[in-house]
Every structure is written in structure tokens, then in C-alpha cells.
Image (cartoon, helix red, strand yellow):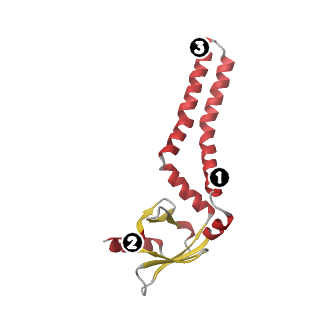
Amino acid sequence: MQEIEYQFREEDLIFYNELQYKNNEDYLKNIKRNRWIYPGVMLLVALFYWSYYENTEQALYVAFIALLWMLVTPWVIKWQMKQNVLESYTEQERNDMFGNYHLFIDPKDPNFLQERSPSGKNKIEWKEMLRVDYEKKQVHLVLDTGIAMVIPTETVSKGNLEKFARQVEQLIEKHDK
């Protein structure tokens, strides 16, 4: 029986959502606008103040605001994203989500990935699983409902994550046919 135990924490949820946002075109446009376009326009205004009005003090003030905007807004956007992620779940949902997980493949019932989590026991059919994604600090078992089971590599307390993920991939391919 192949099994794995791990702990899922709030920072793991945030890291997963950051990865999702970094692949989101609207998020990337927002970062680009706030990091380059708006400060660029402000720097052009500063250049105009300096060259046309010969007002160096005003130009430096506008240029300082533009550089500050360019440096601070990515942090602000990331902080807002974290707040939005955490606010999208109720207290009960967070209690059911965070905690210790036990995933295993039972040889007696090989058609399911079985899960024991803070929300209870679940069985997931292999045909419901799409793929296994390997990220920097996490492994994602992506389901056809658009959600993923996130396994943080640093909190695995029992089992071999690499062997488990390989076996899950094999079983997904086997049941996909």
C-alpha cells in the first residue's frame, strides 16, 4: 500500500494561489500596468516639469512618487491577493481545510485514491483526476472539477512523495484509457 501523510497550512494555500495568479493574464496585466506604465507616465510628467517649467524640485517630487509607486505596488497587490484568498473561505471551511492529511492507495480497493483529512474520509476515483503537477515547494493532484489537492513537500511526515506521485500518475494514465 502506497501512502503519504502531510500537513496542509495557510501558507501552503496562499503559495498555491500565488502560482495560480501568476498564470492569470489579468493579474499579469495589472502588475505590468502598476509597475511600468503608470510610473513611466509619471516620469514623463516629471521630465516635462523639469524641461518645460525648469522646476527641478517639482520634477524630483513626481519622479520620487513614480519610483515609490513602481516598488511598492507589487507588494500591495500581493497582499490584497492574500487577503482575498483568506476572505473567500469561512472559518468552518478553513478548519476543514487546514490540518493533517493521509492519502493512500488501498490494494483491496485500487480504483480510488483514499483521503483522511480534517473534513473526514473521502474516496476519489482515478478518472476524476487529470494530472500531477510538480512545483517548487508543492505537488498538485489536479482534479477535473478545477481544484487541486496540494501536497507541500516540506510537511510530508510519512511516506515517499516522489514514489507516491509517480504511482498516482501511473494510475491516472491507466484509468484514463
Q: Quadrant of the N terminus?
A: bottom left
**Amino acid beneath label 3:** Ser
The reply, left or right, for residue 160 in relation to residue 174 is right
> Residue 114, percent across and down?
49, 78
In terms of depth relative to the viewer, which is nearer, 64 or 89? 89
Residue at disc 1, secondary structure: helix
Tell me which numbered mark, 1 or 2, is placed earlier along the sequence. Answer: 1
**Amino acid beneath label 2:** Lys
The span from disc 1 to disc 2 (Cα, nearest Å) is: 34 Å
Closer to viewer: mark 2 or mark 3: 2
The crowding category of the residue bearing disc 3, from other C-alpha atoms within 10 Å (few below 14, some 14 to 19, many at least 20), is few
Mark 2 lies on residue: 127
Mark 1 lies on residue: 83
Residue at disc 2, secondary structure: helix
Mark 3 lies on residue: 51
| 17 shown above or below 1 | above
The crowding category of the residue bearing disc 2, from other C-alpha atoms within 10 Å (few below 14, some 14 to 19, many at least 20), is some
**Amino acid beneath label 1:** Gln
Q: Quadrant of residue 44?
A: top right
Residue at left offset 59%, top offset 57%? 14
The reply, left or right, for residue 119 in relation to residue 151 is right
Tell me which numbered mark, 3 or 1, is placed earlier along the sequence. Answer: 3
The crowding category of the residue bearing disc 1, from other C-alpha atoms within 10 Å (few below 14, some 14 to 19, many at least 20), is few
Tell me which numbered mark, 2 or 3, is placed earlier along the sequence. Answer: 3
Residue at disc 3, secondary structure: helix
The span from disc 3 to disc 1 (Cα, nearest Å) is: 42 Å
> Residue 51, percent across and down?
59, 13
